[in-house]
Image: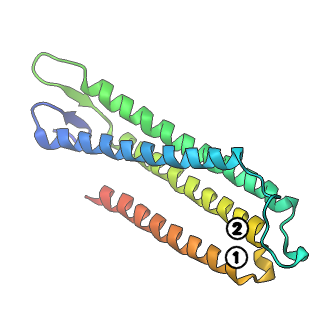
């Protein structure tokens, strides 16, 4: 059997491979849904001028930070939406191809390179969505705690913790994507 052929009835290991792809795509869609809701709520209820904990007025963030916040949130939303739509499209294709009955077996001809490209596209959209969500959170921190350039230790430590944790999680995510394609 060729790498691009997936039999869902007669070959159990390839059927489970298809199931794994669908499960992975489900995970991408579910995670993106949570992030998309968070971004949408952030855009909807954003009132940056209400609270600012900076001690000095020159450390207050200006309109440029507010503008960047909105831009980063919208770009993040777009990447999460892109990723979810690509993943949903792949899931739909896999499910529709696997549901076509033939005389003896269920067999779907799925180009494995195209499937991999779609999964990488969906994962890449999620990764870029997380990067822009991280950037928008840095802007929120600057709006609430003061500009990083002022050296406010609370703002700097908060951003450092955020960047370290998100970067670590994204590194693990990227590593697992590349590792899964090697197997």
Residue in view at x 20 percent, y 27 percent = 107
Occupied quadrant, residue 55? bottom right
Occupied quadrant, residue 171? bottom left
* Residue 142, horizontal then vertical, whole percent: 75, 68
In the figure, is residue 142 to the left or right of 107? right
- Say few, some or many: other residues with alpha carbon within 10 Å of mark 2 (under 14 / 14 to 19 / 20 or more): many
Occupied quadrant, residue 98? top left
Q: Which residue has dot 2 on it?
A: 141
The kind of secondary structure element at disc 2 is helix
Residue in view at x 39 percent, y 65 percent = 175
Determine if residue 117 is in view: no
* Residue 152, horizontal then vertical, whole percent: 75, 81
The kind of secondary structure element at disc 1 is helix
- Say few, some or many: other residues with alpha carbon within 10 Å of mark 1 (under 14 / 14 to 19 / 20 or more): many
Q: CA distance from mark 2 to mark 1?
A: 6 Å
Q: Nearer the viewer, residue 51 or 164?
A: 51
> Which label sits on residue 155?
1
Quadrant where the N terminus is found in the figure: top left
Mark closest to the chain's N terminus, 2 or 1 = 2
């Amino acid at each position: 059997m060729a790498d691009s052929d997936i039999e869902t009835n007669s070959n159990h290991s390839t059927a489970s491979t298809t199931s794994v792809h669908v499960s992975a795509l489900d995970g991408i869609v579910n995670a993106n849904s949570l992030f998309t809701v968070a971004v949408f709520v952030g855009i909807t209820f954003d009132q940056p001028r209400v609270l600012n904990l900076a001690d000095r007025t020159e450390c207050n963030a200006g309109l440029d930070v507010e503008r960047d916040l909105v831009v980063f949130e919208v770009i993040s939303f777009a990447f999460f939406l892109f990723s979810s739509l690509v993943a949903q499209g792949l899931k739909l294709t896999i499910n529709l191809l696997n549901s076509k009955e033939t005389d003896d077996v269920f067999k779907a001809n799925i180009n494995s390179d195209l499937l991999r490209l779609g999964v990488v596209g969906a994962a890449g959209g999620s990764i870029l969505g997380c990067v822009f969500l991280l950037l928008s959170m840095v802007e929120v921190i600057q709006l609430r705690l003061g500009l990083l350039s002022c050296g406010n230790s609370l703002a700097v430590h908060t951003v450092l913790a955020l960047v370290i944790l998100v970067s670590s999680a994204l590194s693990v995510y990227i590593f697992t994507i590349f590792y899964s394609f090697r197997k």
